[in-house]
């Protein structure tokens, strides 16, 4: 799994951080998503998929690793 995030689209809701804190964080100054791990371990894939699905701004994009 390869994750990309669209910082421009992100609204700072923080749901991704609550669901997958090992993969996502937020900037202190504005709450915008920070991607901690663009290719997380397989055991984190379900949480990452859930985070992407609940993102109100659809700022998390999932793809296949190269």
Image: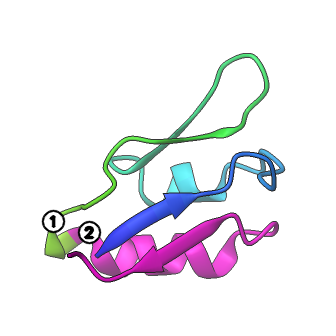
* Left or right of 34, for residue 3: left
Which quarter of the rendered picture does the C terminus lie within? bottom left
Q: Which residue is mark 1?
A: 41
State the image quarter where residue 51 is shown: bottom right
Q: Nearer the viewer, residue 8 or 18?
A: 8
Q: Are marks 1 and 2 in contact (CB under 8 Å)?
A: yes
Q: Is residue 10 above or below residue 43?
A: above
Q: Position of residue 43 (x, y in %)?
A: 17, 73
Kindly state the secondary structure of the residue where label 2 is placed.
helix
Q: Nearer the viewer, residue 48 or 3?
A: 3
Q: Position of residue 50 (x, y in %)?
A: 51, 79
Colour scheme employed for the rendering of this structure: rainbow
Q: Is residue 17 above or below residue 25?
A: below
Q: CA distance from mark 1 to mark 2?
A: 6 Å
Which quarter of the rendered picture does the N terminus lie within? bottom left
Q: Which residue sits at x=55%, y=73%?
A: 61
Magenta segment boundaries in residue numbering = 44-66
* Left or right of 36, for residue 54: right
Q: Which mark is residue 44?
A: 2
* Left or right of 11, for residue 41: left
State the image quarter where residue 9 is shown: bottom right
Q: Position of residue 32 (x, y in %)?
A: 71, 38
Q: Which residue sits at x=65%, y=58%?
A: 15
Q: Position of residue 58 (x, y in %)?
A: 73, 72
Q: Nearer the viewer, residue 7 or 20?
A: 7
The reply to whether the magenta stretch includes residue 47 is: yes
Q: How many marks?
A: 2
* Left or right of 19, for residue 59: right
Please identify the residue farthest to the front as the structure is shown. 66
Kindly state the secondary structure of the residue where label 1 is placed.
loop
Q: Which residue sits at x=16%, y=75%?
A: 42
């Amino acid at each position: 799994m390869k994750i990309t995030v669209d910082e421009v689209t992100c609204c700072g809701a923080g749901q991704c951080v609550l669901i997958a804190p090992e993969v996502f964080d937020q900037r202190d100054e504005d709450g915008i998503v920070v991607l901690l791990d663009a290719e997380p371990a397989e055991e984190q894939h379900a949480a990452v998929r859930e985070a992407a699905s609940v993102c109100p701004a659809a700022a998390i994009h999932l793809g296949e690793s190269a």
